[in-house]
Structures are given as C-alpha cells and as structure tokens.
Amino acid sequence: MAYDTLPGLGQPLRRLEDPRLLTGGGRFAANLAPPGALHAVFLRSPHAHARVLRVDAAAARAMPGVTAVLTAEDTLAAGLGHNPAVTEIRDAAGRRHAEPPRLPINPGRVRHVGEIVAMVVAETPHLARDAAEAIGVDYDPLPAVVDGAAALLPGAPLLHDGAPGNLVCDWHRGDAAAVEAAFARAAHVARLRHRSARILAGYMETRAATAEWDAAARRVTLTTPSQGVHLLHRILCDDVLRWPRGRLRVVTGDVGGGFGPKLPPYPEQALVCFAAERLGCAVRWVQDRAEHHLADTHARDLVADAALALDADGRFLAIRVEAVANFGAFVSTVNPSIPTGGMAKVLSGLYAIPAAHIAMRCAFTNTAPVDAVRGAGKPEALVLLERLVDAAARETGRDPVALRRLNLVPRDAFPHRTALGYRYDSGDYGALLDAAQEMSDAPGFAARRAASAAKGLLRGRGLACHLHGSGGWGTETSVVEVLPDGGIAARTGTQSQGQGHATAYAQVLAASFGVDPARVRIIQGDSESIPRGGGTGGSSSTIVSGTTLTLAARAAIEQGREAAAEMLEAAAADIEWRDGRYEVAGTDRRVTLAEVAAQRGGLEGRADFADTVETWPAGIAACEVVIDPESGAVTLDRFAAAVDAGVVVNPLLLAGQLHGGWAAGIGQALMEEARYDADGQLLSATLMDYAMPRAADLPGFAHSSVPVPSPNNALGIKGVGELPTNGAPAALANAVADALAARGIAGVDLPVTPERVWRALRG
C-alpha cells in the first residue's frame, strides 16, 4: 500500500487540549454529581478464598438514609449475566480456554480479596460506608493459592469446578520439532529463568461510574472513564445486564490515564446501572485508591524458562520459552491473548531467528484478575530475549553490540515473516543501532565506568532491541462535519486518556482541509452519537482514527464539489481541490471550504476504517546504571533511544509518549511489584506499599527518530504508545547485570530493588 504524505503533518504543535485542562476545564467522571444522586459503596471480601454461607443485610437496610442493599440474590433474580472475554486461546487439541462464570456478584463463593459481596446505595457516601459495615457475612475460609505454578500442582486449592487443576489453557505456538533440531546442532545455548513481577496501572484518576435514569425515555446513561464506550456498551447490554441496546447510553469524558485496565467492563459499572434502573434515580460511585489496587485488573505475573541457541559464528538458530502465566481468579476481557499472543508477537525481537516455540500454561489463582497494562505481554518477552542475548555474548566472549548487529533483520528483508508467523512491515534496524550508539555516547562508557569504580561504585550499560505489534480493533466509523461557520467537528470511536488525540487528529484534519488546527474539535466517548468504534488499545489510535478521519474528510470535500461548481458557475468535473479551496481548473476562480459549507448549511463525510491496525514500530534503548554495593541502591544515570514510529504526526506528542512509556517501564524494572502473601492478602494495597517512579528516579531522556513509513496504512504511521515500555525494562535489566558481572553475578530478577541487589551481592 502506498501512503499519503499530508502537508502539515510532523509539526511540533503544542497540545490544543492543555489550556482547558490546566485551567480547571477538565471534566472527569468524579466531577459529575447529578442533583439528588445516591451514592454506592461496595462491600468487598476480606478473604482470598471462602464460601459465603450467609449475607444478612437486614440491619443495613434499616439504617436511616439507606435506599438499597443489593446482593447476589438480587442480581441472580434479575438475570444479570457473565462478563465475557472477547479474545480466546486454544490448546493443541483445539479446546477453548476455560472461562468460568464471572457475574457482577458471584454467589456462594469469593475467590480473591476485594471481590464484591454486596452493594449499598445511600444518600451519602458516609451513610453507605456505615451501612456496608453493618452487613453481616458468614464466611467459611478455604485454602488459597496465589502463585501460578503452585496453582497447577496436584492437590492445589481448586478455584472453579469447571477448570480442573486450575488450568485456563495449555497453549503452544511455533514449531517444536524445528526448535529441538536447532538446539541439537547448536554450538552454544544460553539459558535463563526469569520472573516478571505483577504490577498495577496506578493511573491518577481512579475509576468511577454514574448511572442516570431517564424515566421518560426509559433509558440509563452511564458516565464512566473508559478506553472506549462501544465495547462497554455492547458487553453490558448483551451479556451482563441483558438489556436492549437502546436502554443504555455510555459516555466517557476526560480520562486521567488508562494504560489498559480502563478497557474492560467491571462489575461496578453494571451494578450502578442496575441500581439506577431499579431505583429510578441517579446512582454514583467513585473508587478509592485501595479499591484500585484490590479490584482493578493487574498485569504481568509470569515465570519463564527461556533458551537461545547459537551456531559457531554467533548466529541465532532458535528460541524456546516454557512459561506459566497467572491469570488471577477470573478470565478478564482480553487477557487470553496478552501473555500468549503478546509474547509471540515480539519474541524474535529485531532478529532473524529461524525457529521459535512457546509453551505456556495459564493458571487460575486467588488473586485479582490479570489483563493488559501498557505493553500487554511484550515487556516480559523482551526482557527474556534481551537478557538471553547478553548472556550469550558474555558466555561466548562476544561483544553484545556486535552480536546484535550480526543477527538484525536487514532492511532489504522486509516484509519479514517471523518464525511464529507475524509479518513485520518495515524498518531499518541497523540504522537504529547506529543512532542508539551515538545518542548514548557508547565510546565514552569506559571512562564513565572507571570514574564510578574510583568512587567504589559499579556502573553497567545495557541495550534492548525492541518492537511492538500494534493491535486493537479496527471497527471504526468516523464522521467529519464542516460547519456553516467553517469550523470542523469530528466524531471518532477511539478514546483519549491523555495521549493528545485532540491535537493529533486536529493536525490530520487540518492537513486534509487546509485549515488551522485550532478550528477542529474532536468528539469522543458517546455510544449514542458516534456510530461505532473499537476504543483505544494496542497503540493503534492514530492508525485507526487518523486514517479514517482522512477518508471522511475527503468524503466531505467531495460532497461540497457540486455546491462549489454552482457557486463558481462551472461543471463539477472542472472543479479541483487545492490548498483548502475549490477552484476551476486552470483559472484563479475559487471558493473556500467555509464559503461552500455556509452555502450548503454544512458538509459531512463518513468513512469506515479500511486498513489494518497492524504495524511494527521498533526501537533500541541504551541505558547506564550505577550501583552502590553498600546499600544495593540502583541509580539510573543515563537513558537514550533510537525509535522508528513511521511517519510522525507531531514530534512533541511522540516525545511525550516516549517519556511516559520509558517512565512506566523503568518503574516496573526498578521498584514496582504487587505482592500477595501466602494467604492471598495483597501486601501492596496502598501507595505506601506500592512504589512508583518519581521525577528524582529518572534521568534526562534523549531520543532520535529513524522513521521508516509503514506500508500497512494510508498515512504510513506506526503505533508508539507501548513501544518505550516494551524496551525500558530489558535495557535496565541488562545494565544491572553488566554492573554486577564485575562481582561474578549474572543478574537479578526485576524489580531490581536495593534489597534484592544487596542480597545478590552478598550471595
């Protein structure tokens, strides 16, 4: 596919939405407080695993100001249903993954701390909390299991009768025989066992939901932060509430961070809608921080044994991974494809590896459900791969940069088909490596290491060749209106959570129409007024909305051609569109877009997404760490990267996405870990116990852009939101291993906390 070069793209336009947000004009879900709205509070299980023998809500219902207490008995009687996964995996025999029912309030049993047992609706949040404390629940505690591998052992506590042995799926991908043959003839095999820690999203805005009942229309309007209203609308109506789709409207305003966990439908959203309809009034819930830690989807939590085979010349022959993925207590919305397909997409990295195989057993445990968080299965895979490459270099006496260069996919090999069946679209990985080496001042590292050693400190350098396979849903219809006053209003089904969609999409439309981006207004987050959309996930928003808005703009321009011809007293066939104007070919007679829109009372164009969401942005990150052997403290001293994001719509937005993504990945590598004790109690239930990176933990970032346009979409762009998070943990892990190699230590699992490093040094 040829891509279009729109004039005006690539300009460093400052974010158009920032003045409104910075001056208090943001409108987040918690800001919505309809007059007379009731407040919901959820009673959550204090046990990781228990039978629920009795729920006595009589005292709570009798308290002043309490309107309702809803339990599993109420939701079952109303027929509320299962919250399904929308992706699937199958085992070697073709059997679909196990997916036990996940109801808004599960009857008779709880399977993780924080699971909902009852809902209280009252006149104030305080009254609702008091009433929740008055509910009597008789629990019969059961043994719990929190580790994925332990859950699969014989005799482990069983979570679901329909999932024998706690097995979600025994998933395989690749050619096992070819991998075995490659390992048999290998000159060297590097091996690694690595645990990817469980993490939280940690967005600034916790979840919230307000459901308003319209008695005249007999309809509920749900306002909630999300990553796309259409998926919520479909699952809530079709599966959970079992309502006709016309009975529910879903609205999302400003969103203070999403990162993946605001994509799935949650029980609280369904329950406030159920309560609003049942009570005939507005019902409002705002999550507190502890609820975010206990009840929102977590991510990662995977343990893997990996091996990389090399021939005598150092060329990679095959890679093999055997892993256990912890799914938590239930199968969440897209998680079947996260540790599995997410890993498979990038397991080859930027390298030409002829054979690959993944064997992954997925397990139920008594922990919060796991699903996508920025990177979605790929950071874990790339830590495995890049640590293996460095291990192979150390063990065979090769330079890690030279070993990588030897195995990079050459530019003339694109499109490149990986051993696991993915088709990389474009790239120049050698140029990325050159740029990363230059940006990180590789020649100066030896002097910096010597200077650190003179102070009694250990300095290490790490590289990470990484990429991302953009995904998500291309179910998008965009509508672009040219208003009679010349303004542009565009409705699209992706959902910004801080990425800058209002700016990027305005630039795309401004380039299409030849107008000032400030005249463009982007409308998102309304299941009623936006025909359809797949939401935002998989780093594909600009791919989907950018290309579709471009097509819709062309349709609007074409709609105005007849009116322009009438105004110019010419045949429509003689009218050309040039630089934001209609003109009669070969003359200076022209009218502006705004003049035509005013004449017609407006123009409208619609378009469906017609490309593929798949692109393959790539990067090479280089970082340096300094370790204090006395305390084990790790300081990230330098970080630089070269990236290929295809055609860049706005370099300022690109830099913002890179900085945020690196910070997320660095936090996961240095400090973030959601830990449960053996009884299933979350030890990281607040920000007092779950560390997240601060400005002081991060160095200045440097990057260079080495773009190769994607042939997979009309604009040549590649999705970049998750790319930096994919690479940062691997680069940091390799830098720490390089620093510790001076003491004979191969490395430590992430996060590289001071305690973990200190203990390794004292081995």
Image: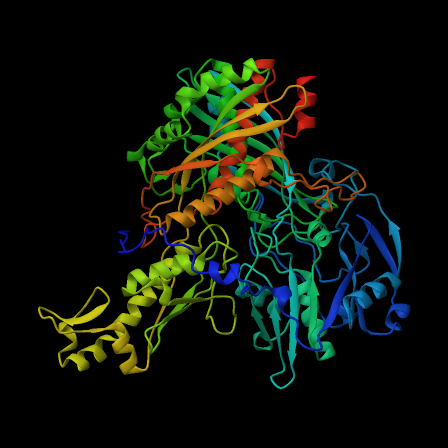
Residue 184 seen by the camera: no
The count of marks equals 0
What's the residue at 35%, 76% (across, down)? Answer: 483
- Taking the image as shown, residue 743 lies to the left or right of residue 419, namely right
* Residue 187 placement (x, y as % from top left): 46, 15
Q: Is residue 425 left or right of residue 78?
A: left
Residue nearest the observer in this picture, 432 or 243: 432
Q: How is the image coloured?
A: rainbow
Q: Where does the image place residue 163, in percent across and percent down from the top left?
A: 71, 48
- Position of the C terminus, as image quadrant, is top right
Outermost residue toward the front in this view: 23
Q: Determine which quarter of the picture holds residue 572.
A: bottom left
Task: Write the residue at 42% across / 30% down.
Answer: 353
The front one of 627 and 739 is 627
Q: Where is residue 693 shown, x and y percent of the image?
A: 60, 40
Work out whether residue 425 or residue 716 is closer to the camera in this orientation and state it: 716
Left or right, residue 709 beside residue 98: left
Q: Is residue 585 visible?
A: yes
Q: Is residue 386 above or below residue 593?
A: above
Q: Residue at x 25, y 77 (%)?
A: 595
> As drawn, which residue projects farthest toward the left?
586
Q: Position of residue 435 (x, y in %)?
A: 36, 31
Which of the 4 quarters of the picture holds residue 122?
A: bottom right
